[in-house]
Image (cartoon, rainbow, N blue to C red):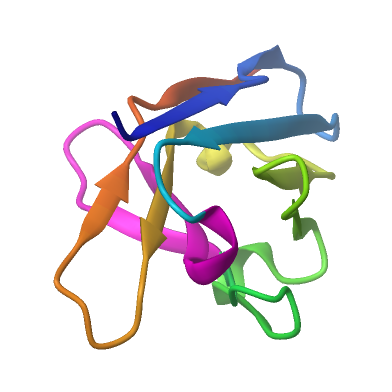
Amino acid sequence: QVRLVESGGGLVQPGGSLRLSCAASGFTFSSYAMSWYRQAPGKERDLVASITSAGIRKNYAESVKGRFTISRDNAKKTVSLQMNSLKPEDTAVYYCKGSRDYSPTVYWGQGTQVTVSS
């Protein structure tokens, strides 16, 4: 059974930091590119950051460049998102996604809430 389980969300003040983690099971994690998306109320789900299967290439949304860092540990089957200098506009549900090139198969986690507020 494929599972992606996010953790690490919560309430943080503006300027603070959070580290999200996504634990994978049930598929060949090291063969999948992994991404973090977020969805704020009333908005579409948007890409935040992605990392290739070997962790060599990373991509970030312009709004988080220089503040967020994506990383992965293929031995532990985890992908993380370190979020620094958080802003109220970062408030959203954050989702972990696994995907492969040339394959329609996509896996999603259930999401974790991040709220940035004073």
Nearest the eye: 112 or 1: 1
Which of the 4 quarters of the picture holds residue 56?
Answer: bottom right
* Residue plotted at (47% across, 20% down): 113
Nearest the eye: 26 or 95: 26
Over which residues does the magenta segment extend? 29-49
* Residue plotted at (72% across, 55% down): 74
Q: Is residue 118 visible?
A: no
How many marks the image carries: the answer is: 0
* Residue plotted at (72% across, 71% down): 65
Q: Is residue 36 magenta?
A: yes
Judge from the rendering whether residue 13 lies leftward or rightward of residue 59; answer left or right: right
Q: Is residue 39 magenta?
A: yes
Residue 72 spot, x, y in % from top left: 74, 55
Residue 67 spot, x, y in % from top left: 80, 58
Judge from the rendering whether residue 2 lies leftward or rightward of residue 103; answer left or right: right
* Residue plotted at (68% across, 32% down): 20
Quadrant where the C terminus lies?
top right
Judge from the rendering whether residue 25 lies leftward or rightward of residue 57; answer left or right: left
Residue 102 spot, x, y in % from top left: 24, 88
Residue 5 drawn above or below residue 118 = below
Residue 4 spot, x, y in % from top left: 43, 33
Q: Is residue 18 visible?
A: yes
Quadrant where the N terminus lies?
top left
Residue 11 drawn above or below residue 2 = above
Which of the 4 quarters of the picture holds residue 110?
Answer: top left
Which of the 4 quarters of the picture holds residue 117?
Answer: top right
Residue 13 drawn above or below residue 47 = above
